[in-house]
Image (cartoon, helix red, strand yellow):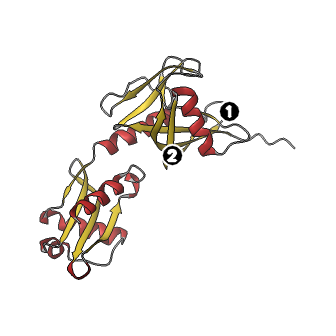
Amino acid sequence: ILYINPSVAAGVLAERDDKVVLVRRAVDPGQGQWGLPAGYLEGDETVEQGAIRECREETGLEVAITDLIDVYSFGAKSNRTGVLIVYAAQVVGGTLQAGDDAAEARFFGPLELPEDIAFSTHRQALADWHQAKAIRYREATLDEAPVMVALNDRYQFDRPRDYASYMREPQHAIYVAVDRDKVVGLSGVSLRDPDHTAYIDQIFVLPNYRRWGIATHLVERCMDFG
């Protein structure tokens, strides 16, 4: 029995110094356009191994996978459908040099991304990355206490809490992640004198903002406070 299954591809959104590496494709589909380092899996490798290999072959860079970004379907309008699995990664070595089916490899900042991205799946991943890079982190204000209560009521990530009273105490702090004027994540930290310890009391990120390092940034601010 021969099963006609979708093909599986893997790619990485690899960062260094807050920039992402893209490759200009040397072959069709999408010849001359930009995309993430990505390609079809080989028969003897895991998805993670395939993503790392594709990045090495197309950019010359060694990467360490840090998280799963998303899983995308492609090819719905053609005779060959597929699944693309995209990972977040950090560059840990190697020298930037285009190879395999890439004509050029280059790092781009969030405001430098080219318009001619070859594939819709890559465009979506890069759009999410650009959005995450626009997030700002700061200490919460008392005016934002009702917003935190509303988030807690909706997602129930913590016991009911008087956020305004919490923030008024000098041994407490709440940090927020803000997308424009919208609070998309928060973390709370408290200092306890008897054992000279700082405790992270809560951490929350809106579901559609996860997997982009927002929680990590919020934890880092709690650590700085401690």
Q: Position of residue 47 (x, y in %)?
A: 62, 44
Residue 106, image x, y percentages: 42, 24
- Up/down of 173 relative to 117, above or below: below
Image height of 142 relative to 43, above or below: below
Residue 203 found in image quarter: bottom left
The residue lying at 66 percent from left, 37 percent from top is 41
Residue 74: tell me if it is visible: no
Q: Tell me what residue is drawn at x 40 percent, y 53 percent.
A: 208
**Rendered-image quadrant of the C terminus:** bottom left
- Residue behind mark 1: 80
Report x, y in % for residue 143: 13, 64
Q: Mark 2: which amino acid?
A: Ile
Q: Label 1 is placed on what type of residue?
A: Arg
On screen, residue 38 above or below 30: below
Q: Quadrant of residue 84?
A: top right
Q: How crowded is mark 2: few (under 14 residues within 10 Å), some or many (20 or more)?
A: some
Give above or below for 138 relative to 108: below
The residue depicted at 54 percent of the width and 33 percent of the height is: 55
Residue under the image location 55 percent in, 32 percent down: 56
Residue 212, position as x, y percentages in the image: 39, 49
User: Do tag 1 and tag 2 residues touch (Cβ < 8 Å)?
Assistant: no
Residue identifier under label 2: 65
Circle nearer the viewer, 1 or 2: 2
Give how far apart the Cα atoms at labels 1 and 2 are.
28 Å
Horizontal side of 28 relative to 65 (left or right) equals: right
Q: Residues within 10 Å of mark 1 (few under 14, many from 20)?
A: few
Helix, strand or loop at disc 1?
loop
Foreground: 24 or 95? Answer: 95
Residue 222 vs residue 20: left or right?
Answer: left
Q: Reading the chain from its start, which is encountered first: label 1 or label 2?
A: 2
Q: Is residue 109 visible?
A: yes
